[in-house]
Amino acid sequence: MASSSSRGPSHNGVLHEYAPRLVAFEFTPPVEGVNKTNSLLFVGGLTDGFCTVPYVSKLAKTLENTDWSVFSVLLSSSYGGWGVGSLDRDVEELGQCVRFIRDLKASRQPGAPSSAGKIAIMGHSTGSQDVLHYLYSPNPVPHKEFDFGLQHMVRPELDGAILQAPASDRQGLQAIIESSLQPDELKKVYDDLVTFAKEQPYTEPNSDAILPMNLTARLSYPADTPLSARRFLSLVSPESPGNPSDDDLFSSDLSDKRLEETFGAVGAQGLLKSKILFLYSGEDEYCPDWVDKVELLQRWKRATEAGGAKWDYENSGVIAGASHNVHGDGQQDLIDRVLRYLQSI
């Protein structure tokens, strides 16, 4: 029998199937009968799944004595699915999860209106792209050439939205290439992949081309994860900053006009009932050193407020010493900010 030190901790909870083949894990307190009307949905980033982001279980523990429960949501793009996923699919599945949880919480309170409980979504890393895409993109998402079976369902409103570690995939890859021991060689690999991806046919519905995995691994993508031409071009956005892709939301060189179209469109879409919380990690290893995080947050704030949405002044900011997934320093600071935010909405 393996010793307890060879495995991770266990967590009390309930696994919910919120849509076919899609599940969410609800952390539940050890004491039964606690009525939690409000829900915080957590969405991880690329390669994430259950318990891969270290602060989530601690956040759930902190919220045990409140009326907020934490759900860790699995999407089609979780774990290795991100390589063939899309933000459109992510936000549609999140909308399905929001509807499921709202009905679930209403069923636990006989006689109470279904709108009694609040629902907030917290995204980590590329999960932050999901949150912003949920809030600003057309509702439902428009038909595109590669729909892959999307139902184009109307997304429900949210009571809160949190973006943690909203780093740029494009600039993160740029920093990896520039800091490598062989930058010219990696730049050629990147150029070859971009050329290969652009040459793939985009005419056959429900089909996509997979890039050579031995080459994508050279750019630090997981060697065991298939990456489609479509998603690669969205993540690296080779036409940026002039013509950014769907995934290129957080790069520091994007124009004010682009920010107006994304951050600035949140208010007009009307999907967020309260303010929005931004938490940037002070020592984010995926953010290039030359990015001014404080100034970047200020640009996002100006664009958000200019569009009529509200920014959480009290709790948004750069978390000193925090890594990308806040596995050490800054973890308690992050949790305290999230707790204050949830209490305020």
Image (cartoon, rainbow, N blue to C red):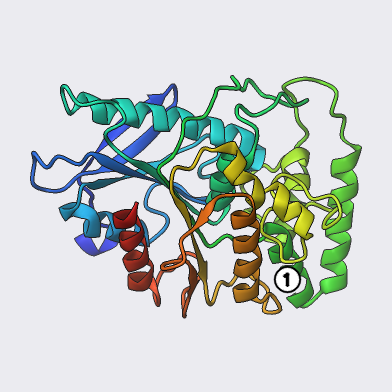
Question: In the shown orientation, is residue 147 left or right of residue 11?
Answer: right
- Residue 74, percent from left and from top: 44, 39
Question: In the shown orientation, is residue 272 left or right of residue 66?
Answer: right
Mark 1 lies on a secondary structure that is: helix
Nearer the observer, 74 or 109: 109
Label 1 crowd bin: few (<14), some (14–19), many (20+), radius 10 Å: some
Q: Is residue 295 above or below residue 217?
A: below
- Residue 202, percent from left and from top: 84, 28
Nearer the observer, 232 or 68: 68
How many marks are shown on the rendered structure? 1
Q: In this view, does 143 lie above or below 299?
A: above
Say whether residue 27 is visible: yes
- Residue 222, percent from left and from top: 62, 54
- Residue 197, percent from left and from top: 84, 42
Residue with the mark numbered 1: 175
Q: In which quarter of the image is residue 88?
A: top right
Q: What residue type is disc 1 on? A: Ala
Q: In which quarter of the image is residue 119?
A: top left
